[in-house]
Amino acid sequence: MQAVETVTSPPEKHFVQSLGLLDSTMLVAGSMIGSGIFIVSADIARQVGSAGWLLAVWLVTGAFTVSAALSYGELAAMMPRAGGQYVYLREAYNPLCGFLYGWTLFLVIQTGTIAAVAVAFARYFGVLAPAISPTAWIVPPINLSANYAVSLSTQQFAAILIIVLLTFINTRGIQIGKLIQNVFTSAKTLALIALILIGVLFARNADAVKANFSDLWIPRGVTPIKPDLSFISSVSAGAGVFGLLIAFCVAQVGSLFSSDAWNNITFTAGEVKQPRRNIPLSLAAGTGLVTLLYLLSNVAYLCLLPLDKIQTAPDDRVATAAIETVFSGAGAVIMAVAIMVSTFGCNNGLILAGARVYYAMARDGLFFKATGKLNARSVPAFGLVLQCVWTCLLVLPRTRLRDTAGTPKLDPLTGMEQYGNLYSNLLDYVVFAVLIFYVLTIFGLFILRRKRPDAERPYRAFGYPVVPALYIVVASVIMLVLLFYKTETTWPGLLIVLAGVPIYFLWNRRAAPAPAPDR
């Protein structure tokens, strides 16, 4: 009698719990600190017009971010599973809500941010290597329509190489990914500390300190906030309490964008040791650290530069202008190196974390099936590659810049047409949508307290219900202001989100979801 051969399938791969508390905190802080802190203070200063209100914007953003992180801590401890915020929205509301977040994350939130940070890296690399330029063409711009073109410059090519390199590294396992994250987050944290010490203690400009801090709250040199809706009047921070409120809310866009991505640690919950303890702690520690660094960095700017110099910093490079006052002639190179370190580490964290959301969606049958599998090194390699491909594609399209008369803008030196980046527009569009998902997630905290009162909650949100409710109120006010004063960049964001509704129903008709091991 012939024996029957039994065929057994290989055991399914599981995530490896490799991230300790320090690693998780480095991921939170490293994903937050990119190029924004070195640049956006110029625009904020133009909008609010005084040193006091500039610091107040960053202080409110920090309190806002930390309060959200503390609320997310309860959800993370309650549901320590790969996918993080996607899972929270799915469980609090329904699979459609979770999918819309994951859809928007893949389409532009995560990928668009990675593209923007990679181009920022390449732009500052160009300070050291002038051949890396936005106008040194490998493939010159090809105009596709009145508003769009595609191109490949050496700057775009360098950005793509960084994305591909970091993606490849992260397919090799979580250990090397966390090593890079820890090293580069430590380096850029030390760089910000050095900037703070130089500005506040060792090289402060007495005239700048006197000018900025003796007249702390009176707006000056402000840029009027021009609404996109013609029936609403322009306002400015110098036009009474209402104008100041509007300018303050609009200014939050820059500081909130610079402080975003702190939630990425929740995506990697399946790889965190003792996640019920370490994720809430890392959220609090990481956001608290970055808030302090950002606030003190702006104090340093104000100790080195008069406010008008911050408002008019060339290309908004406030940090470069500040350091240039101390290291004359070398400031541009010093800050270029610092920003390259910062953006490299930031993108490593973003690339590492994003694929874990697509993995969770695929396990629910709501994304490409292959993204729900782990490779031999226990990471979602296909999700990483798919994210890489889409991100690289987002680097290529360009917007054709036009003046107020609708005429294409020309470079005054070369006479050539000037181009913008498509992902910059997409990121503007989704700022509003990102706030919606944050509000929905924190409101989900209240829903889950009612739906699952007996669920295990090793950590409970600090200040509940007051702190989470206050976040919802403040975020809603900011969204309302943006809806009326930045209409052109709010409605498109909603359309991007809503475009996922028919996609969800198409995907939902596919095969039933597979079981979803998190570790």
Image (cartoon, rainbow, N blue to C red):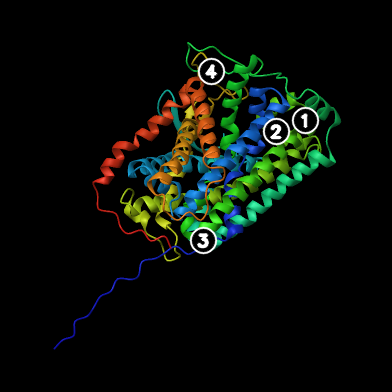
Mark 4 or mark 1, earlier in chain: 1
Q: The C terminus lies in which quarter of the figure?
A: bottom left
- Return the mark for residue 516: none
In screen coordinates, is 12 left or right of 15? left
In the picture of the structure, the residue carrying the numbered disc 2 is 318
> Circle 2 — which element?
helix
**Residue corresponding to mark 1:** 305
Spatial separation of the CA atoms under disc 4 and disc 1: 31 Å
Q: Is the residue marked by circle 3 packed among few (<14), some (14-19), or many (20+) residues within 10 Å?
A: many
Q: Amino acid at mark 3?
A: Ile
Identified at 57% across, 49% down, the residue is 283
Q: Identify the mark nearer the N-term, 2 or 4.
A: 2
In the rendered image, which residue does mark 4 sit on? 403
Packing grade of label 4 (10 A; few <14, some 14-19, many >=20) is few
Secondary structure beneath label 1: loop
Q: Of the residues under marks 1 and 3, which one precedes in the sequence?
A: 3
At label 1, which amino acid type do we have? Answer: Leu
> Above or below — where is 45 with respect to 293?
above
**Residue marked by disc 3:** 174
Q: Nearer the viewer, residue 351 or 31?
A: 31
